[in-house]
């Protein structure tokens, strides 16, 4: 037995498998007893952002995320501890946040009469494996461009959507172009840990903002005309302090407002347009005879009176306002806040060159993903034991059962390590691909064992090399057949099966070029003396 073990470890094929397993473990970087909450996103200009906490990069590995260890010296072990501590914070309270990267002191803001920090967090990850929306929960939107457009328009849309989502400080965001088998273009947006309807509305909104005086455009949204948009409490409000919440027909109305800074060119257009306007008097106040009208996607959202003192002046700092409505005062405040954030985002990022129609929206709960993972692990273990039991019954040799189980586990481990390296999100389709890859691995191992068994029963001289070659001839044929079947799935169903196709291809490739050769050598050494 010792001689056979030594022979196994002398094989370069086995060493390739062992190195692949080692690299996979390093890439996954597993850890136990992880405490704290990881920062998933930070709202721009929020108290957390102003305190210097950086928005995490979406490409960063999960274990590289900044982890909150304590709030006001109270230890944070999980998301429940975090929510408990945050619930006790009052607006304008000083908050000390300690993370694995430093200490931050911030002043809690106020939103909807409650304190807010602008942080989006989740339980600190125990490894570098990224999971898809079906596992961690979130929102998936499929958008379809309409009208006439070209490739440059689509590239601009993709970049603009990413910028709009970045305004919310979200890092676990995927915005990608996908095409179906008919060649139609779709934009798939996946936002982990987010269920907010305002984000979904933002995705479908073309966002053409125009400020007009009469028929003349003073400025439009985007960096060309708008150089700064205020998002801090010092220069923005959800409820106008002068008007308060007003009762209107059907409910209540709250007026939001915030300041913006125009480029010198836009300010000069304002001066040129207002220079010839007339001044009208209303009591002790005087205004110009034209208002500045604010349009979003062609819809008038507000009209602002222009003070006579601004006539002909190249004013760069102005205030933008708009209404929010609701059946109750709270609903009016929430609608005002949502409208303000959307308008601020559009002003910062500009308009999209094409109209986007929402084809489908899915909001997924993380609870289902947790149950699926636990059930999948349990069922996988049962399936593995069943497979090894059937193999033992078939061949009646204990020496082959353990290698089969080791190779099955090694294939899963290598696949997870590869996913961690390339940043591939494991969704339900990808996990199904792993199952398919492992299943084909069992088939290939049985083919190798059958060829060896048939060769050992032959009355002529046993040529081990010939037996293995026959087995791999069948395995390679099945491999290329699988590749041919998987490639069309990259475009089927608007790319929703891409994870399944990609994982299956990687899985069977790992098997054919790494684990199957190692298993064949192990089986040859263990069965030679039978």
Image (cartoon, rainbow, N blue to C red):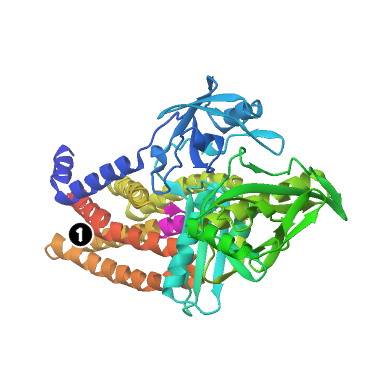
Residue 431 falls within the magenta-colored stretch = yes
Residue 462 drawn at (x, y percent)? 14, 61
Q: Residue at x 79, y 42 (%)?
A: 244
Residue 104 vertical position relative to residue 155 in the rendered view, above or below: above
Residue situated in front as seen by the camera: 322 or 272: 272
Q: Residue at x 46, y 50 (%)?
A: 383
Task: Looking at the picture, tell me which residue is in the foreground, 167 or 188.
Answer: 167
The residue shown at (72%, 51%) is: 335
Magenta segment's dominant SS is helix
Horizontal relation, residue 415 to residue 298: left or right: left
User: Considering the numbered disc 1 on the image, is that residue within a helix, a strand or a loop?
Assistant: helix
As drawn, the residue found furthest toward the top would be 73
Q: Which residues are magenta?
A: 425-436
* Residue 278 in the image, given as x and y percentages of width and height: 71, 63
Q: For residue 428, say whether it is visible.
A: no
Tell me if mark 1 has few (under 14), some (14-19) or many (20+) residues whose alpha carbon lies within 10 angstroms of its own: some
Name the residue carrying label 1: 456
User: Magenta span has 426?
Assistant: yes
Q: Is residue 348 left or right of residue 321?
A: left
**Residue 407, image x and y in percent?**
31, 49
Which quadrant, please, contains the N terminus?
top left
* Vertical arrangement, residue 443 with respect to residue 243, above or below: below
Foreground residue, 176 or 499?
A: 176
- Residue 523 lies, with reference to residue 86, above or below; the image says below
Q: Is residue 118 left or right of residue 392?
A: right
Residue 147, x across and y down, in percent: 55, 78
In this view of the protein, which residue sits in the foreground, 85 or 319? 319
């Amino acid at each position: 037995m010792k001689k056979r073990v030594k022979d196994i470890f002398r094989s370069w094929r086995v060493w390739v498998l062992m190195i692949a397993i080692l690299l996979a473990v390093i890439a996954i970087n597993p850890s136990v007893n992880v405490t704290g909450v990881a920062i998933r996103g930070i709202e721009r200009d929020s108290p957390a952002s102003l305190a210097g906490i950086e928005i995490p990069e979406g490409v960063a590995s999960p274990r590289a995320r900044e982890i909150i260890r304590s709030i006001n010296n109270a230890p944070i072990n999980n998301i429940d501890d975090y929510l408990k501590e945050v619930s006790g914070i009052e607006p304008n309270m000083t908050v000390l946040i300690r993370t694995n990267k430093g200490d931050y002191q911030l002043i809690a803001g106020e939103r909807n009469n409650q304190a807010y920090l602008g942080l989006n967090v989740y339980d600190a990850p125990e490894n570098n494996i990224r999971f898809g929306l079906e596992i961690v929960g979130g929102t998936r939107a499929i958008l379809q461009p309409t009208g006439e457009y070209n490739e440059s328009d689509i590239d601009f849309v993709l970049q603009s959507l990413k910028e709009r989502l970045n305004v919310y400080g979200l890092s676990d965001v995927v915005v990608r172009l996908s095409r179906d088998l008919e060649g139609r273009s779709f934009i798939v947006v996946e936002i982990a840990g987010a269920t907010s309807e305002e984000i979904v509305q933002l995705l479908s909104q073309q966002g053409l903002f125009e400020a007009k005086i009469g028929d003349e455009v003073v400025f439009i949204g985007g960096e060309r005309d708008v150089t700064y948009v205020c998002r801090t409490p010092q220069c923005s409000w959800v409820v106008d302090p002068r008007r308060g919440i007003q009762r209107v027909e059907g409910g209540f109305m709250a007026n939001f407002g915030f300041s913006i800074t125009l480029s010198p060119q836009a300010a000069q257009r304002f001066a040129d347009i207002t220079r010839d306007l007339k001044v009208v008097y209303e009591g002790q106040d005087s205004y110009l005879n034209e208002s500045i009208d604010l349009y979003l996607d062609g819809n008038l959202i507000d009209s602002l009176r222009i003070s006579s003192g601004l006539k002909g002046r190249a004013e760069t700092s102005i205030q933008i306002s708009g209404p929010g409505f609701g059946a109750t005062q709270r609903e009016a405040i929430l609608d005002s806040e949502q409208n303000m954030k959307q308008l601020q985002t559009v002003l910062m990022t500009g308009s999209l060159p094409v109209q986007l129609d929402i084809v489908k929206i899915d909001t997924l709960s993380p609870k289902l993903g947790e149950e699926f993972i636990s059930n999948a692990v349990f069922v996988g273990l049962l399936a593995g034991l069943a497979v090894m039991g059937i193999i033992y019954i078939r061949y009646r040799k204990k020496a082959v059962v353990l290698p089969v189980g080791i190779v099955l586990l090694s294939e899963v481990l290598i696949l997870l390590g590869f996913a961690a390296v390339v940043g591939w999100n494991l969704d339900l389709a990808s996990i199904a691909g792993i199952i398919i890859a492992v299943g084909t691995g069992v088939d290939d191992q049985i083919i190798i064992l059958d060829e060896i068994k048939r060769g050992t029963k032959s009355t002529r001289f046993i040529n081990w090399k010939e037996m293995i070659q026959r087995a791999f001839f069948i395995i390679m044929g099945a491999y290329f057949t699988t590749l041919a079947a998987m490639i069309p799935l990259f475009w089927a169903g608007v790319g929703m099966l891409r994870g399944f196709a990609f994982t299956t291809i990687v899985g069977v490739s790992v098997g054919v070029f790494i684990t199957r050769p190692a298993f064949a050598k192990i089986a040859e050494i263990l069965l030679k003396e039978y």
